[in-house]
Image (cartoon, coloured by chain):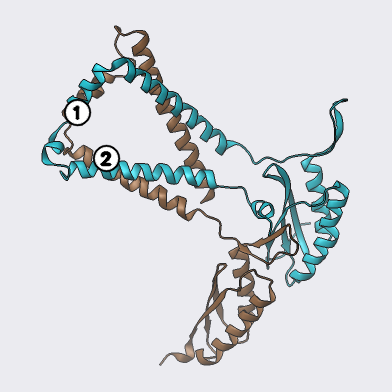
Chain colours: A cyan, B brown
């Protein structure tokens, strides 16, 4: 199992999970710290002092220019990080085109669009016996194009037979026609689903 | 779950941006126009913070809410992983997966097709397949080995990367006193 093909199984959610988990951990830690202070575990006098501590305020007054610059820097960092995070979650998954011959001089070359590849492979995969429905998509994994195939198998289809036919016919043909030695491929199988009734 | 965590990440991103913008506006205004009061109502916030002691109920409630929300977010992030069932790789650069739901569906079809089974429910993961079957005609002692064999056969037929443990529970009308 190559790492590329494994990464192509689904869009990565690592960033979303890391941010939500990290911010959750920070929030829980801050809340717990406030509770500790409030309960008087750091000393009764500490607990009865106001939230905006006079000593801290005095210190900030004494170092006002530096405090202001520090606050500005923190503000800029917060805005940048927030915008980056929001744009990362909103950005759709990239579908890279395949560049077969890059000709920089004439600004030409041969480029196969992601939709064209996906459509050709989808049609090919649907012709395999035992496959009821196929969906294909070109995704980017570690800056190389990879393939994600979703196959709905007919009831009682032999998974071994579907695999070998898929590998021999569909994937080999895709590799040959695109002229690449290997395309990392992730296949998602849906087994045993009911035949979809088509209304005529 | 996946959508929820993405929406949450988006909301957090926007909230962080807003906080940063408020800080920038406030400090920037205070630096540019030191004499003309603050843009966000800093003095009012500060006065309120000077009144509140750490023992105030407001602080305690806020802290509790913060802890609860943080733990909920941690839990959500931990649970949002993928639960794909991996199959053996047919070729070096090909990965094949299926969903736990698909696996449960075909196991359920096989179990329901077995003689004597009235109804069945199946839950599946990469590690285990759990079957609960009910029967009116056969008692547990006779039906359970048959079902275990059937499901094991099916699971071994599929080229799964890891063969799951099969657990079968049979509820039979015959076993009732």
Q: Residue at x 38, y 50 (%)?
A: B72
- State the count of labels: 2
Q: Nearer the viewer, mark 1 or mark 2?
A: 1
State the image coordinates of residue A200 (x, y, percent, origin top left). Answer: 79, 56
Query: On the image, which quarter does residue B102 sit in?
Result: bottom right
State the image coordinates of residue B83 (x, y, percent, origin top left). Answer: 56, 60
Q: Characterize the local packing of mark 1: few (<14), some (14-19) or many (20 or more) Cα atoms within 10 angstroms.
A: few
Q: Residue at x 80, y 61 (%)?
A: A166
State the image coordinates of residue A17 (x, y, percent, origin top left). Answer: 49, 47
Label placed on residue B62: 2
Label placed on residue B156: none
Tell me the subunit letter for badge 2: B
In the displayed structure, does residue B75 sit left or right of residue B92? left
Residue B36 at least partly seen: yes
Give the structural element (helix, strand or loop) at label 2. Answer: helix
In the picture, which quadrant includes the N terminus of chain A? bottom right
Tell me the subunit letter for badge 1: A
Give the structural element (helix, strand or loop) at label 1. Answer: loop
Seen in the picture, residue B38 relative to A24 is either above or below; the reply is above
Marks 1 and 2 on same chain: no
State the image coordinates of residue A112 (x, y, percent, origin top left). Answer: 83, 40
Q: Characterize the local packing of mark 2: few (<14), some (14-19) or many (20 or more) Cα atoms within 10 angstroms.
A: some
**Residues under labels 1 and 2: Cα distance?**
18 Å
Seen in the picture, residue B143 relative to B119 is either above or below; the reply is below
Name the one closer to the observer, A111 or A46: A46
In the displayed structure, does residue A33 sit left or right of residue A44? right
Label placed on residue A53: 1
């Amino acid at each position: 199992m190559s790492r590329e093909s494994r990464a192509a199984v689904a869009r990565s959610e690592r960033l979303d999970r890391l941010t939500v988990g990290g911010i959750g951990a920070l929030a829980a830690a801050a809340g717990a710290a406030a509770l500790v202070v409030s309960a008087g575990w750091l000393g009764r006098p500490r607990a009865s002092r106001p939230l905006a501590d006079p000593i801290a305020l005095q210190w900030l007054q004494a170092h006002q220019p530096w405090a202001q610059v520090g606050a500005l820097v923190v503000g800029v960092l917060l805005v940048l990080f927030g915008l980056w995070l929001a744009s990362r979650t909103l950005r759709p998954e990239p579908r890279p085109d395949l560049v077969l011959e890059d000709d920089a001089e004439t600004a030409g070359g041969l480029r196969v669009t992601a939709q064209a590849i996906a459509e050709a492979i989808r049609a090919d995969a649907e012709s395999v016996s035992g496959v009821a429905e196929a969906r294909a998509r070109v995704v980017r994994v570690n800056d190389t194009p990879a393939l994600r195939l979703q196959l709905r198998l007919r009831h009682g289809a032999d998974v071994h037979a579907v695999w070998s036919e898929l590998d021999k016919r569909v994937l080999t043909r895709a590799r040959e026609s695109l002229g690449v030695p290997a395309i990392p491929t992730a296949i998602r199988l849906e087994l045993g689903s009911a035949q979809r009734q088509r209304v005529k | 779950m996946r959508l929820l965590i993405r929406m949450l990440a988006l909301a957090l991103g926007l909230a962080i941006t807003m906080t940063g913008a408020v800080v920038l506006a406030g400090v920037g205004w205070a630096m540019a126009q030191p004499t003309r009061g603050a843009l966000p109502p800093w003095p009012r916030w500060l006065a309120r913070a000077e009144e509140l002691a750490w023992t105030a109920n407001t602080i305690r409630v806020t802290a509790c809410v913060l802890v609860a929300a943080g733990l909920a977010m941690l839990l959500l992030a931990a649970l949002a992983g993928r639960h794909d069932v991996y199959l053996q790789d047919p070729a070096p650069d090909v990965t094949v997966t299926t969903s736990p739901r698909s696996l449960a569906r075909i196991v359920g079809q096989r179990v329901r097709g077995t003689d004597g089974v009235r109804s069945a429910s199946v839950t599946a993961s990469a590690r285990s397949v759990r079957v609960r079957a009910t029967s009116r005609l056969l008692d547990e002692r006779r039906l359970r080995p048959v079902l275990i064999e059937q499901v094991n056969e099916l699971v071994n037929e599929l080229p799964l990367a890891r063969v799951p443990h099969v657990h079968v529970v049979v509820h039979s009308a015959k076993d009732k006193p």
